[in-house]
Image (spheres, rainbow, N blue to C red):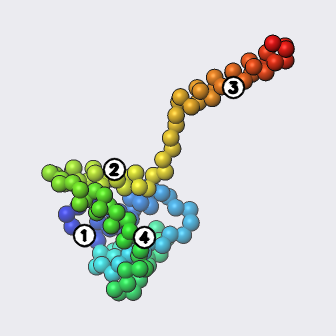
Amino acid sequence: MESHLRTELVVAALEMAYAQHAPCQKVIFHSDHGTQYTAVAFGQRCDELGVRPSMGSVGDAYDNAMAESFFASLECEVLDRTHFRTREEARTAVFSWIEGWSTPTVVIRPWAISRQSSLSRSSARISSLQAQNF
């Protein structure tokens, strides 16, 4: 998170995303017509990574509806509800929200595992008693 939108910022973000996800299939990077995305340096880095840049027509918000929805949700759920005292506080909140939005949640409930085990033991004991005609 920086205080600018220069080309080096979007190149660094592209590199970070590519390194974290190591895509094995073709990747398309869709953006608006911002100067940082039309810069030669950004296009060259996309070529080096095998990423295909894509831009919609000027003034068409629907071609990038998913990104528009994502940022609208971020703004509504985080940015509009909090007054951040520092840039670091804002960065942490945005990072946490993005991680929660993009990371699948796996819930492990130890009590369910131990409960299942005790139920299995009880069923086995009942079956054993039934076999003995108790």
> Which mark lies nearer to you, 2 or 3?
3
Disc 3 to disc 4, C-alpha distance: 46 Å
Q: Earlier in the sequence, mark 2 or mark 3?
A: 2
Name which quarter of the figure residue 35 lies in. bottom left
Dot 1: few (<14), some (14–19), or many (≥20) neighbours within 10 Å? Answer: few
Tell which of 2 and 49 is nearer to you.
Answer: 2
Which residue is denoted by mark 2 in the rendering?
Answer: 96
Disc 1 to disc 2, C-alpha distance: 21 Å
Which residue, as the protein is rendered here, is positioned at the far front? 134
Could you tell me if the residues under marks 4 and 2 are in contact, i.e. CB atoms within 8 Å? no
Inspect this view and state whether residue 9 appears.
yes
Q: Secondary structure at mark 2?
A: helix
**Residue at image x 37%, y 80%?**
61
Disc 4 to disc 1, C-alpha distance: 21 Å
> Which mark lies nearer to you, 3 or 4?
3
Which residue is denoted by mark 3 in the rendering?
Answer: 120
Tell which of 64 and 81 is nearer to you.
Answer: 81
Q: Earlier in the sequence, mark 1 or mark 2?
A: 1
Q: Position of residue 114 (x, y in %)?
A: 58, 26
Which residue is denoted by mark 1 in the rendering?
Answer: 5
Dot 4: few (<14), some (14–19), or many (≥20) neighbours within 10 Å? Answer: few
